[in-house]
Image (tube, grey):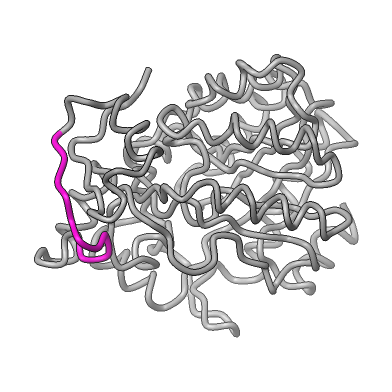
Amino acid sequence: MIQIPEKIYVEESVSNHPFTKKILSKIDRTPIIYVEDYKKIGEDKPFTQRADEDKNSLALANKKGELVKSIGRMDHGQFYLFHEIDCKYDCEYCYLQYYFQTKVPVVFVNRDEVLEKIEEILMSFDNPYFHVGEVCDALAFDDLTEFSLDIAELFSRHENGTIEFRTKSTNVENLISIKNPPRNIIPSWTFSPQKIAETIEHKTPSFNERLSAAKRCQEAGYTVGVRLDPIIRIPGWEDQYRLIVEELLTTLDTQKIDYIALGTPKHNKVLFEVIKKRFPESPTILGEIFPSTDGKYKYLKFQRVQIYKTMISWIREFSQDIKVDLSIESNEVKELVFKSV
């Protein structure tokens, strides 16, 4: 079922673009506002008002500059996609709160250029890896854009590459409609205990809804990723996270889990101040969270190590084989966690 945005902003320069018309035909009763530049949407509102209100809308625009970007901090041959930006969900810990000037989720209609660039990379690198969902939710608007269908066609022809869709969405109808889906497409979900999902991850599907979507994708032939990031030390966190580890690894086929990623809050100073302004009582900034040597606000090192080792011990009760990674952690922490696990 298509979730209709409250308003659609359309850049005047793309009003007659075929992809614009395709999307508008699916939501023909939604009010349309034509703008000169999507970056100016909401500029007359205070920041907090934009952040609260504009996520309920959608903008269609033309992307200038790079649509696919190499990731410098990762291994050579890894890329982000900028085919969409921002997110209709509103998680209290999300860096997208400050990352873009506008707070309206944007779909760029020059989609053919994205696909052409991806194919160029697939033909130039041995094993490129594409991350979809770093600057948007990878599937939140897939019912409108059908991006996953285009990707499936492309990646079925180029088996050397891998693409990961990172999401909290249940918008998987296109994915599961694909017969014999390419093995190099990995849908991955961020999972949190339901108490966190309903109080911190605003506007997102519940834990059970995400789990059901992941299970459906496995049944359709996909291997999925599991992201437990950030793990938030709310009162009783151990019981709640142990429960979701058990539910995940007894509901999903552990042989069809590509990896499990673990992470804890990591806020730079700008994000920390944004969260304080918008969500002053957020557990993501309260408690024992301090500036680290890299300038990011984190739990103390010994606390992070303890969290990771505890989580891994629970995972290993169900599977010795699942690959477990730590998300954006120092080599020192990784050594402390994995040397005795």
Instruction: Say left or right for 261 vs 23.
Output: right
Q: Residue 34 magenta-drawn?
A: yes
At a point 39% along the width and 53% down the height, the residue shown is: 86
At a point 66% along the width and 32% down the height, the residue shown is: 245
Q: Specify the quadrant of the image occupied by residue 96.
A: bottom left
Q: From the top left corner, tell me how far across and down residue 76 is, in percent.
A: 80, 68
At a point 84% along the width and 67% down the height, the residue shown is: 335
Q: Nearer the viewer, residue 207 or 220?
A: 220
Q: Specify the quadrant of the image occupied by residue 43.
A: bottom left
Q: Is residue 77 above or below residue 211?
A: below
Q: From the top left corner, tell me how far across and down residue 134 is, in percent.
A: 54, 55
Q: From the top left corner, tell me how far across and down residue 222 is, in percent.
A: 73, 25
Report the span colored magenta: 31-40
At a point 56% along the width and 80% down the height, the residue shown is: 292
Q: Residue 90 magenta-drawn?
A: no
Quarter of the image with the N terminus in it: top left
